[in-house]
Amino acid sequence: MRQRMITGIVAGAGFLGLCMLGGLWYHVLVLLMSLIGYYEFVRMTGIRPFQGTAWIGYLGVLYTVFPWDLLGLAMPLDLLRSYWLLMFLFLVITVISKNQIPIGQMAMLFLGMVYIGIGFHYLAVTRSTADGHGLFWTFLMLAAIWSSDAGAYFTGRRIGKHKLWPAISPNKTIEGAIGGIVAAVIAAILFAVFSGGILGIGQALLLGLCAAAVGQMGDLIQSGYKRVYGIKDSGTLLPGHGGILDRCDSWIIVFPFVHILQLLPIF
């Protein structure tokens, strides 16, 4: 527990400090997190993390999260066309290798690239939104996610009786999930109250609900594939906490969700 607390304080302070600083420093941190996250994903699936085909996925993640705008550069191809070309390359490899490199392996590498690349991409771009309030939106979503995690944990321990999804995550309860939703909504509404008009109560309610419900699903997604591969943690980078994906499983689902569905009031 002591090691977990120390790691949490140091890692959290470092992340939040660079987030407040913003700009290229923060974006590079998120880029590094995304590459480590992809390494963890590849390793979890039983694929050698530095074999030739895995490097295509690393390059895809790098391309997706790279700070093009901050460096004054234009992305050569949009993500849709880039992903199609990378998918084509993965599929061609299965043909060239005469199925010695199976399509299932290529599919996992491609899936991980999109899942992790898009997730960290939106974590980075939220900080640099055009309305100038990127720090507010980033802290809002992180606070709602963290409040959901804490609310679910403590409510589940206190009054949790009915299992939420025991085949995937045996310790989660329905009562805990509800407690997480309530905690996230309260956190989001508090942000709205002290936002100076940036965020309305109704929008805060919606964002809090999304952060909790989608964030908990993000946690279940990772619990599901870790159970399939028979592992407890995605990595060991953060002593007492596991790997990058263990800490960011909700983030890399929630941030794309609110952007893609245009739920943040910045559009």
Image (tube, rainbow, N blue to C red):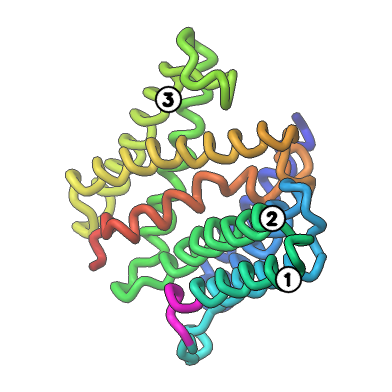
Q: Residue at x 49, y 41 (%)?
A: 218
Counting from the top left corner in percent of width and height, residue 152 is at 47, 26
Counting from the top left corner in percent of width and height, residue 56 is at 68, 72
Helix, strand or loop for disc 3? helix
Earlier in the chain: of badge 2 and badge 3, it is: 2
Q: Nearer the viewer, mark 3 or mark 1?
A: 1
Q: Please give the range of residues in magenta.
A: 77-82
Q: Amino acid at mark 2?
A: Gln
Q: Which residue is mark 3?
A: 177
Q: Residue at x 59, y 61 (%)?
A: 110
Q: Amino acid at mark 3?
A: Ala
Q: Is residue 80 magenta?
A: yes
Earlier in the chain: of badge 3 and badge 1, it is: 1
Q: Residues within 10 Å of mark 1 (few under 14, many from 20)?
A: some
Tell me the quarter of the picture where residue 135 sits: bottom left
Q: Quadrant of the C terminus?
A: bottom left
Counting from the top left corner in percent of width and height, residue 179 is at 40, 23
Q: Residues within 10 Å of mark 2 (few under 14, many from 20)?
A: some
Whether residue 225 sits left or right of residue 186 in the image: it is right
Earlier in the chain: of badge 2 and badge 1, it is: 1
Q: Residues within 10 Å of mark 3 (few under 14, many from 20)?
A: many
Q: Residue at x 23, y 60 (%)?
A: 265
Disc ID at residue 55:
1
Q: Quadrant of the N terminus?
A: top right
* Majority secondary structure of magenta residues: helix
Q: Are marks 2 and 3 in contact (CB under 8 Å)?
A: no
